[in-house]
Amino acid sequence: MHRMTSLYGQDANDFVPERWEDNELERKVGFSFVPFHGGPRLCLGKDFALSEASYAIVKIVQTFSNLRLPPQIGKEKTGQVTSAEGCKVLLH
């Protein structure tokens, strides 16, 4: 499904992250990106895969003990619990 040229165009097999920037694809298909499917055919390994990904992130953070964020100048104050500059990580 994620490589259908009828949905994603002739470059369906290419890595094109810009295709997710606009909502045109989302308007075409409600479930335009469904890595684990949904409903009665939900992937049995979904919880395991998400758990493994979480574990891998924790191990990376533990392995690189001197992770430092670049200095931030003028943080924007918002009512949301998110960073205005995104999540930046420096690995040594």
Image: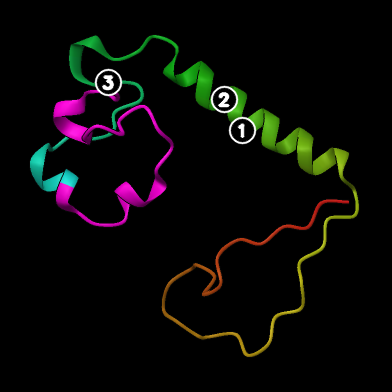
Labels 1 and 2 touching (C-beta < 8 A): yes
Rendering coords of residue 39 (x, y %): 19, 18
Dot 2 corresponds to which residue?
Answer: 51
Sequence order check, earlier mark of 1 and 3: 3
Q: Is residue 2 left or right of residue 40?
A: right
Which label sits in the foreground, 1 or 3?
A: 3
Q: Is residue 71 above or below residue 65?
A: below
- Which residue appears at 31% of the width and 56% of the height? 21
Number of numbered labels in the structure image:
3
* Residue type for callout 2: Ser
Q: Is residue 10 above or below residue 39?
A: below
- Give the alpha-carbon distance from disc 3 to disc 2, as whole Å: 17 Å
Rendering coords of residue 44 (x, y %): 38, 9
- Which residue appears at 22% of the width and 34% of the height? 8
* Residue type for callout 1: Ser
Is 16 magenta? The answer is yes
Rendering coords of residue 63 (x, y %): 87, 38
The residue most toward the left is: 28
Residue 64 is tagged as: none
* Residue bounds of the magenta highlight: 1-24
- Give the alpha-carbon distance from disc 1 to disc 3, as whole Å: 20 Å
Q: Is residue 88 above or below residue 85?
A: above
Dot 3 corresponds to which residue?
Answer: 37
Circle 3 Cα neighbour tier, 10 Å, few/some/many (<14 / 14–19 / ≥20)? few
Q: Is residue 70 left or right of residue 2?
A: right
- Give the alpha-carbon distance from disc 1 to disc 2, as whole Å: 5 Å
Dot 1 corresponds to which residue?
Answer: 54
